[in-house]
Amino acid sequence: MKRYPFLNLKHANAAYAEDIKEAVCRVIDSGRYLNGDETAALEVELAQLCGVKHCVAVSNGLDALTLIIRAYKEEGIFADGDEIIVPANTYIASVLAITRNALIPRFVDADTATLNLDTSKIEEVINARTRGIMPVHLYGTPCWDETLKQLAECYNLVIIEDNAQAIGAKAQCPGIHSSSTTGGLGHAAGLSFYPTKNLGALGDAGAVTTHNHAIARIVKALANYGSDRRYHNVFAGYNCRIDEIQAAALRVKLRHLDQETKRRREVAETYNREIRNELVTKPTIFGNMQQVWHQYAIRIEERDEFREYLRISGIDTDVHYATPPYLQPCYKEYSHLQMPVTKAIADTIVSLPISAPISTHDATTIAQIINGFNS
């Protein structure tokens, strides 16, 4: 029986392996392993992709978001105790970046169609301490619309995108600075290049993208011990630098990102066309935006039974995410919140294989097996 792995990183990187090895050797031979030419070139290429003026490559996605918020604090725009609106349905890193900076997350429930932040519910939670909104482009679907843009302008709020899962995606309307690409929609964005991402490194890596020169300058200093030049520390900073090997590997894979995105879209379209089981709620494909399908997340009430059925049939699945941040033990002070849509998503969500080496033929076979499930 053929097995369909959820993710095999060796296979996912196989097509680029020789070029990555060559890039790594180039770094080793250069003798420059931090803050070198590979990092500088990667920052230029990522800025161009997102349609922004500035990019700072950093250690990981969580650090990217943390550095952005800290930079706005250093600018005097955020202060301890201020609130940032964040979706209840997200990975915990979105919230950790807020609380690590002594700010308060204000959770808003999800939208049933996009699974992202329900922008229609934002205004009702805005108060005198609200300073920002963190839309999360979950599963590769952009979280951006005119409502979000207008709220930011009306209430003078900073928009910080969590773009860990949607690199290269395009929203259905332009962002604040005209770019329609995620990472360039709001005022600043945090990117993750964790190995499982559409653009994945060989370890941890991330980046900050922004249109704001001052924020980019502060982020760059904060990530390097708070120094603007050697042995001159203007901030009490961190060590959040990317290394040259990760930057070099990412530059190789960045050249193939369009191809990777095209293949993921083909698999997603195949699933949407071929899955006909009425017990399964398929994700929405929005014709007026360009999703990049970091995950293909379906919903089904009989999740445990369904996953076991697929496992026996040779199909690996995953759950993103079974417990939302506001119900995690570390955030027990928020456990009283009622987020019915988010809770329903968490109880029913299942991610199907969509990364390499899943082909459209494989997707058709998986869909046929899914169609055979009954509770």
Image (spheres, helix red, strand yellow):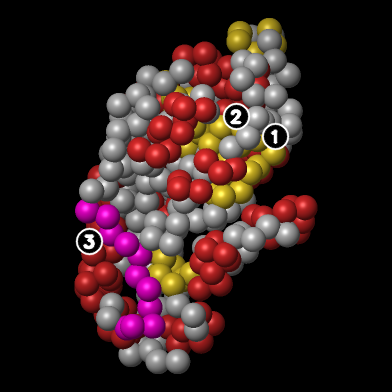
Residue ID at (35%, 65%)? 283
Can you tell which mark lies on residue 103? 1
Q: Earlier in the sequence, mark 1 or mark 3?
A: 1
Q: For mark 2, what is the residue?
A: 131
- Residue 260 in the image, given as x and y percentages of width and height: 28, 51
Q: For mark 3, what is the residue?
A: 266
Q: What is the three-letter code of the residue carrying label 2?
A: Arg
Residue ID at (46%, 33%)? 151
Q: Secondary structure at mark 3?
A: helix
Marks 3 and 2 sit apart, C-alpha to C-alpha, by 39 Å
Residue ID at (22%, 61%)? 266
Q: Are marks 3 and 2 in contact (CB under 8 Å)?
A: no
The residue segment tinted magenta is 277-287
Marks 1 and 3 sit apart, C-alpha to C-alpha, by 41 Å
Q: What is the three-letter code of the residue carrying label 3?
A: Glu
Q: Quadrant of the N terminus?
A: bottom left
- Residue 188 in the image, given as x and y percentages of width and height: 47, 28
Whether residue 190 appears in this view of the structure is: no
- Residue 145 in the image, given as x and y percentages of width and height: 36, 41
Residue 86 against residue 5 in the figure, above or below: above
Residue ID at (69%, 39%)? 104
Q: Nearer the viewer, mark 3 or mark 2?
A: 2
Q: Is residue 177 highlighted in magenta?
A: no
Task: Locate residue 235 relative to residue 304 in the image: left or right.
Answer: right
Q: What is the three-letter code of the residue carrying label 1?
A: Leu
What is the quadrant of residue 271 in the picture? bottom left
- Residue 86 in the image, given as x and y percentages of width and height: 57, 44
Q: Earlier in the sequence, mark 3 or mark 2?
A: 2
